[in-house]
Amino acid sequence: MQPADPGQTPTPSESPYPGGRCVSPLNEDVAPAAPGEFAALEVGPLRVWPPVVLAPMAGVTNLPFRQLCREYGAGLYVSEMITARGFLMGNRLSVLLASSDPSESPRSVQVYGSDPKDLGEMVRALVDEGVDHLDINLGCPVPKVTRSGNGSAIPVKPRLVARLLRAMVANAGDVPVTVKMRKGIDDDLLTYLETGRVAQEEGIAAVGLHGRTAAQLYSGEADWDAIAALKQAVDIPVLGNGDIWECWDALRMMRQTGCDGVIVGRGCLGRPWLFQELAEVFDGRIPANPPTLGEAVDVMVRHAERLVEFFGELHGMRQMRKWVAWYSKGFAGSASLRGRMAELERLDQLRPLFAELDLSEPFPRRALRVGRAKGSKKQKVKLPDGYLDQRDDDTPPKGPHSLAEIEAWERSLQGG
């Protein structure tokens, strides 16, 4: 499948898929968008059509992947989270991950931090660079993050949330600021409705909700009812996130919840063509079927070439190891690649990995809804000692401060 190249869906007699379409049973009866059914997503002065956002994902949504996704379809493509203190101190990796190029418009950056001063200074610097959209991470569930009172731990303290958002909005000028969050810590401590109201009061342009708690990580099904409840609770746009595995899921989510747009996360890992499919169904068309293995390998090689150009060959190909698993997920014989993926260090080693596989194999229907990331089990969320005893406290938690600590922190979050 080539970027933005609409194809014809094969007739049932020609197709390896039931009914001629590669779609899961869950979505077989879902119709494309009707004319005028959905409006463009409005985020401050930005008008986004289709109403689709690439989720910021650590170790994933760097410039090479954002560029690749953008070639397949329109939308808003957000950077992985950039540590505010690391960016301000000039940490090489922080600055690289926040970088862009003239082809990236609108330019969107997710910031990560828990100190209002740092966030304000970072926002001001990014606005001076010409960024078009800013998002704050209030949802990361990684133990290393929550243990220090950051990420999904921050919404436990609404006054701290207000301080952080106020600092960002005050320094953003006309650039819209949004929030990405989870439902809460666990089912006994849900924070999303209160955080949504605080966000609205502080001038946030839109809120994105992943319909899982931090304790759930990526397990179970996303709670779309929570997205609907947030939409009812606030007047600003709400973006739904969770279980968008197929383009049809985005339509179902918006129809079921009334949300204003969707955030696509793990469903696009190794499947950047999902954004072309999304663009087509929102425009009322049935998309072409996904690529064969050989076509997917071609996309993967283009992706690898860009990672090598961006990070250098050794670092780029080490990043590529996880992508090989995602691109080949579900294809016959893909399990045999796992042992050799760890040896990838050069670009010329990539295609030979697939020499013994059938490159003409159609995309496996069974792989449409298969998880593509770590964290499929639940966890007990780690918080600082006594963190829940003072929920009215707005004191920023401690984080990495020295350049060495920041470098270690940034690299630890690059696993994807």
Image (cartoon, rainbow, N blue to C red):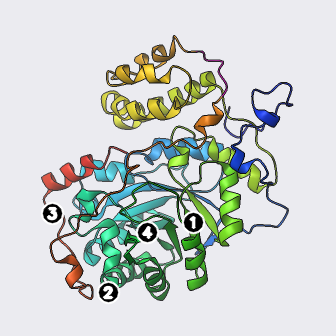
The Cα atoms of the two marked residues, 2 and 4, are separated by 16 Å
Amino acid at pointer 3: His
The reply to whether the C-beta atoms of the residues labelled 3 and 2 are less than 8 Å apart is no
Mark 3, secondary structure of its residue: loop
Picture quadrant of residue 292? top right
Specify the segment rendered in magenta.
358-362
Mark 4, secondary structure of its residue: strand
Compared to residue 100, the image places residue 33 above or below, namely below
Few, some or many residues within 10 Å of mark 4 (<14, 14–19, 20+): many
Q: Residue at x 53, y 77 (%)?
A: 205
Q: Residue at x 55, y 25 (%)?
A: 297
Mark 2 or mark 3, which is nearer the start of the sequence?
Answer: 2
Residue 208 spot, x, y in % from top left: 51, 69
Query: Which mark is in front, 1 or 2?
Result: 1
Amino acid at pointer 2: Arg
Compared to residue 312, the image places residue 214 above or below, namely below
Picture quadrant of residue 219? bottom left
- What residue did someone put label 2 on? 159
The Cα atoms of the two marked residues, 1 and 3, are separated by 33 Å
Depth check: give the residue in front, 136 or 95: 136
Mark 3 or mark 1, which is nearer the start of the sequence?
Answer: 1
Residue 282 spot, x, y in % from top left: 75, 56
Compared to residue 106, the image places residue 337 above or below, namely above
The Cα atoms of the two marked residues, 4 and 3, are separated by 24 Å
Amino acid at pointer 1: Gly
- What residue did someone put label 4 on? 181
Depth check: give the residue in front, 12 or 268: 12
Mark 4 or mark 2, which is nearer the start of the sequence?
Answer: 2
Mark 2, secondary structure of its residue: helix
Few, some or many residues within 10 Å of mark 1 (<14, 14–19, 20+): many
Mark 4 or mark 1, which is nearer the start of the sequence?
Answer: 4
Query: Which mark is in front, 1 or 3?
Result: 1
